[in-house]
Amino acid sequence: MEYTFTVLGHPNITSKHKTTLEFTKDPDISLRADCIVGVKSQVSMNNIPQEIIGLIKEDNRPITLRLETENATDTIRGYGHHELTLDHPTDMVSRKSDFICSRTLMINADKASIDLKTELINDLKDCKPLKVTIII
């Protein structure tokens, strides 16, 4: 099962965070927002179809995020958990840790924002769109 949405890059994307990766509906970010790799998200957790939400809330459910820009593709693999609330109105976070809050989309991910391909980050710094696909 797949769900796809689009976010935009931003000149302040640094992609230097070592444990998380985030998408937000917010239109602007500061240079301190080193985990954010996409702004102006078309969706929030509330827009993800319920059948996908149900699967994400299963313990150890494998989840893949496919990230695609004009010049690069990257993937992040993580897991679901029954304690995920998936109800934050603006943010979605993939975490290398097992920390859970309303912003958490998946835990125990194999990559954070610092691990993404350089070509992908360069596209995002140039404000190009990022296609995000959640694959269950």
Image: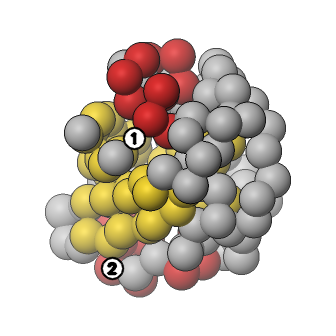
Does residue 15 appear in this view? no
The image shows residue 58, relative to residue 97, as above or below, that is above
Res. 96 image quadrant = bottom right
The image shows residue 122, relative to residue 94, as above or below, that is below
Res. 6 image quadrant = top left
The image shows residue 45, relative to residue 109, as above or below, that is above
The x, y position of residue 36, in whole percent, is 61, 54
The x, y position of residue 11, in whole percent, is 52, 58
Colouring style: secondary structure
The x, y position of residue 130, in whole percent, is 32, 51
* Amino acid beneath label 1: Val
> In the image, is 108 to the left or to the right of 41?
right
**Cα gap from disc 2 to disc 1, whole angstroms:** 17 Å
**In the rendered image, which residue does mark 2 sit on?**
119
Q: Residue at x 36, y 68 (%)?
A: 75
**In the rendered image, which residue does mark 1 sit on?**
7
Secondary structure under the numbered disc 2 in the rendered image: helix
- Specify the quadrant that holds the N terminus: top left
